[in-house]
Amino acid sequence: MPEFSTRLSGPATRHIAPLRVGRALLRSAACTLACALALSAPPSAEAAEALWFYPNESDVVLRIVDGAIDGVPVERSGWLVLGLDPAGAAAARAALAQDPAVAELITLRGAGDLLRLRPADGDELALSRALRGRPGVRWAHPDLRVRLRPHALPDDPFAADQWHLENTGQRGWSEDADIDAERAWDRSTGVGLVAVIDGGVELVHPDLSVVPGADYIDGDADPSPEGDAHGTAASGLAAAIGGNGLGVSGVAQGAEVYAIRLIGGATSLSQVRDAFVEATDAGADVLNNSWGFDNGCSSYGLYGVLRAALSYVEENGRGGRGSLVVISAGNGACDNSGDGLLNDPHVFGVGATTGNDGLEDYSSYGTGVDISAPSGGVLSTDLSGEPGYGSFEGDPNYADFSGTSASAPIVSGAALLMFSANPELTAAQAREALCLSADKIDLAHGDYDETGWSPRYGCGRLNVGAAVALVANAAPGAPTLRPFAGDPYEDRVVLQITPPVDPDGDALRCEARIWPAAESPPPAAPEDWQGMEADALDLTGALEVGAAYGWTARCADGWTAGPEAAPASFTLRAVGARADTGAPAADDGVDDGVDDGVDDAEDDLSDSIVDSGEAALPGDEADGAEGGGKGGGCAGALPLLLLAPWAGRRRR
């Protein structure tokens, strides 16, 4: 199978790289198999006219035989795509523009290092091979045209209700074999935008809020379906309007759908990439892909242009936090562990489960599955008044929907709820949290390993109630700066705060920054912040005597930092400037820089901190001065991304 797998998706995992270790080994094995399937050695001289090319940076070779690659039909477009080294992209692009072998050159949307070329002699395969060895070119391959296939089973029986949201035993199914949506809705009903990259979405369906994107089949701005209900059904499961007195509710009741038509005709690999970039640029929080290439479960690597698309989504989506790419695992009832796209670190693959929390008999399985979600007859939106997938209780606007095509948008809706509950959440954190909160189902047959991962269900069946509870977050408030009683002296300078109480009860970590005194605090760079221990920062010996300083502090939970405290200022005084009043510290209650007859070396007390009677810093107990030693607020950040029990096993 070529590089354009059963699905497509996005972003790189910046925070959970350890989860990819096991998958990396699997990808290596898959590549070995792909090499064998593709006759990995370059053709000999006698086969110089053979239809072969390199799909990416590796030495794997793919051949077009009888109009297909590994059994998957492809069409030549007469164009090729290539990726340049970013450092020299401008010079390389200029050189290509002057190359007589290049008839036309286009820079792909949103990327200065990705180009689409039309060769002068019409042989894009030969030109891709020639350019691959040119300095500054990372990869070059033909921009093949392929046909995407939906992953739905529209002839399944109708559902009595939306049991996937709340399963009470309908149709004899198992009670609570659902995603626990009502628990999630207690915190968030979902806002945001889900891109449904599919066969088109009905723009005026009464139960959907749709933003029109583009039609990559007809090449226009109208992504309406041409009698295909697949994208409309996927949209309803993710984001049908809730609480409007109509039909059904999506998992994310308050979200909008960004419609892109990509299924229904031949599309090039660069168009697939452009669809992902367009969705990201339009502000999509999640990209739902309930489709794939008609490849069964053959093994293949990933084309460079699709790899670039996934990286773009991860790096640019949601203001740099990354948008989540969700892709259905396929309906081949086969092992998809060699699927290059599903095994990409930026893709979240979804398998299908039944109303009895078992594996749907059509669902593919293996390392291409990250999580599973209900399918096998889930009620959703259908084409209005048209013969789509049927009707529900006589209403043609709704019908049953099945396949991993149904499972994927349920997960997409869950991700929207999570991003709504915690806007600071990254795509990497969302993937991690979805797996950490999943229910381990079918323990007798799931074959879960010691890390909690199953080749049948991935990390388990989606539990959006638990996922939203895990990530829901309110940022902490600003700390309170504990004032100096007079300016501090050079032999002891300790900045101290009283941390806020976190609204969610999370542990906090706090940090401070300091600057030469000015009328207002200057903009802070990340390196300006210094971590505080026990709510204090000791700067003794680090500041200039006689200089004036301003300072502030802030605290963060496991997700985000709260606001800075109102700044304070002080001047560092020399020790010799002290006046001896003879008043003992126990009498005045304040170590305020006034000599109380006790040697500082003996009491080790900051000469700048108000004595409040609370526990002191180590060594200060005799003075009774508060040293910030309560420690309740800054015990450390929530280690969500470091505690995954299956971190050494999972591919992501």
Image (cartoon, rainbow, N blue to C red):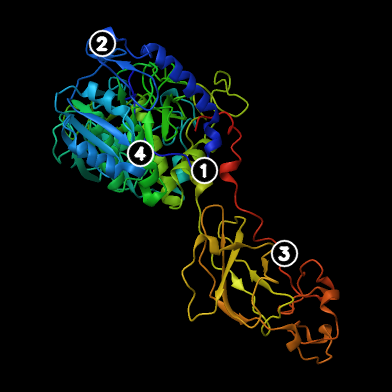
Quadrant of the image occupied by residue 249: top left
The picture places residue 152, in percent across and down from the top left corner, at 31, 24
Q: 586 or 411: which is nearer to us?
A: 586
Give how far apart the Cα atoms at labels 3 and 1 are. Answer: 31 Å
Q: Mark 2–mark 3 contact, CB under 8 Å?
A: no
Q: Can residue 386 be seen from the camera position used here?
A: yes
Q: Which circle, 2 or 3, is nearer the viewer?
A: 2
Check disc 4 and report its element: helix, strand or loop.
Answer: loop
Marking on residue 225: none
Residue density around tag 2, few if under 14, some if 14–19, many if 20 or more, within 10 Å: some
Q: Are marks 3 and 1 in contact (CB under 8 Å)?
A: no
Upstream in the sequence, badge 1 or badge 4? 1
Image mark for residue 630: 3
**Mark 2 sits on what residue?**
65
The foreground one among 317 and 51 is: 51
Instruction: Give the amino acid at mark 2.
Output: Val
Of pointers 4 and 3, the one earlier in the residue sequence:
4
Cα separation, mark 4 vs mark 3, equals: 53 Å
Q: Amino acid at mark 1?
A: His
Distance (Cα) linking label 1 and label 4: 25 Å
Q: Residue sitting at 59 percent across and 67 percent down?
A: 512
Report the disc number at residue 15.
1
What residue is pinned by disc 4?
A: 85
Q: Quadrant of residue 369?
A: top left
Q: Amino acid at mark 3?
A: Lys
- Between circles 2 and 4, the one closer to the viewer is 4
Q: Which amino acid does the dot numbered 4 rest on? A: Asp
Find residue 121 and report its horizontal and vertical position in percent. 14, 24
Of badges 1 and 4, nearer the viewer stands 4
